[in-house]
């Protein structure tokens, strides 16, 4: 799950509520990450042959036919061996045939022999057979494929693009099934092997391989022991820098590799409280710059399918990296104040269709403004606050995040408080104070306190809007803390008007 160390504002009296928020958010994120993992990231991927029609209904061979092909054709070298291997790979799409195959004596030994042989076409078809096996729903298939994995890793360098891509997806498919398999792959050097793929070809000229590397690495990064064993190995390698190099605003670069790389970076950033290594490599600068570009594209009406799959992990990366970034380094790590514009654009664009994505945008905006007067000022300068105030009626946690952003602004300067009042925040608070959500009411009282103590005119305006009667009503609230806050405001700041 990703961290939310800075989902707060600095108005004081935040100890217990901040911790409760953090724990609640962690549980929520755990559920979301599980959903993402189950739906896509650890789902296996099957590459079809280029000469296959994806709509064609294949006749799947039975276990008996697998035996026939294997022992009567493939074991004997001859002109038909390649075509029989191709037939075997299609036969291995049947789960029952997969089990039959691995139980046959010397079956994997035969595939490994073909994989290491001198015939290039037979090597390719042998890898395809392994690829079909790796896509199996049976968990005992992956350990059976381990004799072939050292050769698959070796072939990640120096082979054709298609061959490399096939090896990568086969390795990626083997990762989720078995912790023992993951440990073996780590011991066999899968991390340096993945890094080596970036040296074989220019990323901009081989998007398919870059996407496959990202897929395989993301499978590894979701292991239960990833934070303790796998992620330190990744951070010590050149992979983070390579992943960042794939994140580019260039629209011709293709979304798929960037999506896979962004999800890998997300798993890296959420694994530790300290992301100094990634910050030193420019991860926050790169991810935030891409978010600015994507926000601009969305503002122009671009909501291409799949765009949100890139925006989502980028938001999480930026939010987590902000949590690790020292306050004094923020201006060098995030250089473009247009980031607040992009975050507000994403918030507005997805609030109706994908509220979870809108909530992520509000969370990042909160982390960005928690300790920065510059970005708080940017929200006012770019006339973005009115739009945020209008979103306070929304639920699903979005209004809480937005109110925290407004609290961050109010906390920075009294002048900001006056501007917030002029933009209509007082009347909005009158509405949020009537909500049933205890957290929303408590936070509204905190923001109200910041506003009324900033300027006598603001307090007078709140009284004119019926604020005294509203706070007197809140004094009958069932929550003692809420009653105390309302009473304090009345007795010390409002009853004199």
Image (cartoon, grey):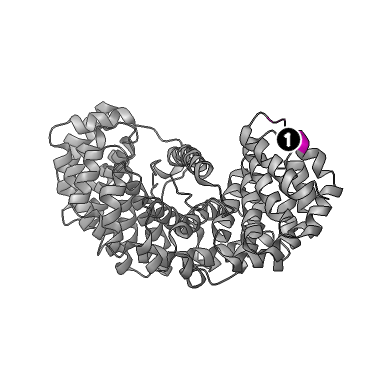
Looking at the image, residue 201 lies above or below residue 477: below
- The image quadrant where one finds the N terminus is top left
Say which residue appears at 68% left-offset and 54% top-offset. 450
Residue 80 in sight here: no
The x and y percentages for residue 303 are 64, 55
Residue 323 in sight here: yes
Q: Nearer the viewer, residue 176 or 147?
A: 176
The x and y percentages for residue 253 are 49, 66
Q: Nearer the viewer, residue 210 or 375?
A: 375
Q: Which residue is mark 1?
A: 474
Is disc 1 surrounded by few (<14), some (14 to 19) or many (20+) residues within 10 Å? many
The x and y percentages for residue 481 are 62, 37
The x and y percentages for residue 322 are 48, 59
Q: Secondary structure at mark 1?
A: helix
Q: Nearer the viewer, residue 361 or 34?
A: 361
Q: Which residues are magenta?
A: 472-477
Say which residue appears at 59% left-offset and 62% top-offset. 294
For residue 301, side relative to residue 159 (left or right)? right
Say which residue appears at 73% left-offset and 40% top-offset. 433
Check if residue 116 falls in the magenta segment.
no
Looking at the image, residue 190 lies above or below residue 199: above
Q: Point out the residue furthest to the right here.
A: 464
Quarter holding residue 100: top left
């Amino acid at each position: 799950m990703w961290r939310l160390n800075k989902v707060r504002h600095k108005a004081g009296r935040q100890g217990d509520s901040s911790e409760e928020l953090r724990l609640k958010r962690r549980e929520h994120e755990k559920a979301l990450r599980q959903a993402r993992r189950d739906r896509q990231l650890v789902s296996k991927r099957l590459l079809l042959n280029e000469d296959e029609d994806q709509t064609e209904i294949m006749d799947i061979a039975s276990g008996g036919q697998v035996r026939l092909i294997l022992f009567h054709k493939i074991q004997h070298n001859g002109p038909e061996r390649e075509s029989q291997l191709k037939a075997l790979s299609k036969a291995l799409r049947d789960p029952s045939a997969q089990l039959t195959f691995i139980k046959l004596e010397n079956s994997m030994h035969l595939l490994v022999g073909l994989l290491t042989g001198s015939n290039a076409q037979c090597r390719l078809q042998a890898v395809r057979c392994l690829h079909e096996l790796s896509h199996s729903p049976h968990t005992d298939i992956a350990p059976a494929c381990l004799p072939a994995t050292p050769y698959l890793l070796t072939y990640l360098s120096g082979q054709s693009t298609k061959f490399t891509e096939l090896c990568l997806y086969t390795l990626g498919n083997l990762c989720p099934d078995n912790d023992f398999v993951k440990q073996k792959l780590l011991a066999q050097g899968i991390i340096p092997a993945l890094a080596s793929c970036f040296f074989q070809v220019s990323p901009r000229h081989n998007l398919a391989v870059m996407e496959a590397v990202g897929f395989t690495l993301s499978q590894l990064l979701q292991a239960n022991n990833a934070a303790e064993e796998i992620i330190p190995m990744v951070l010590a390698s050149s992979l983070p820098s390579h992943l960042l190099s794939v994140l580019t605003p260039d629209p011709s670069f293709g979304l798929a590799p960037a999506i896979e790389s962004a999800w890998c970076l997300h798993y890296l950033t959420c694994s530790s409280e300290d992301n100094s290594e990634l910050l030193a490599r420019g991860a926050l600068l790169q991810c935030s710059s891409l978010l600015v570009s994507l926000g601009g594209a969305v503002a122009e009406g671009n909501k291409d399918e799949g765009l949100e799959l890139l925006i989502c992990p980028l938001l999480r990366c930026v939010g987590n990296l902000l949590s690790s970034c020292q306050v004094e380094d923020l201006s060098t790590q995030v250089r473009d104040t247009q980031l607040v514009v992009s975050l507000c654009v994403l918030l507005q664009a997805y609030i109706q269709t994908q509220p979870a994505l809108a909530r992520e945008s509000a969370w990042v905006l909160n982390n960005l403004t928690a300790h920065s007067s510059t970005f708080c000022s940017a929200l006012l300068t770019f006339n973005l606050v009115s739009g945020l105030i209008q979103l306070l009626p929304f639920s699903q946690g979005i209004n809480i995040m937005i109110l925290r952003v407004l609290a961050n602004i109010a906390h920075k300067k009294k002048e900001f408080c006056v501007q917030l009042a002029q933009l209509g925040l007082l009347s909005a608070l009158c509405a949020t104070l009537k909500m049933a959500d205890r957290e929303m009411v408590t936070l509204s009282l905190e923001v109200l306190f910041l506003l009324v103590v900033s300027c006598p005119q603001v307090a007078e305006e709140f009284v004119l809007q019926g604020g005294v009667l509203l706070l007197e009503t809140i004094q009958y609230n069932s929550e003692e803390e809420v009653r105390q806050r309302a009473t304090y405001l009345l007795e010390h700041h409002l009853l004199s008007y």
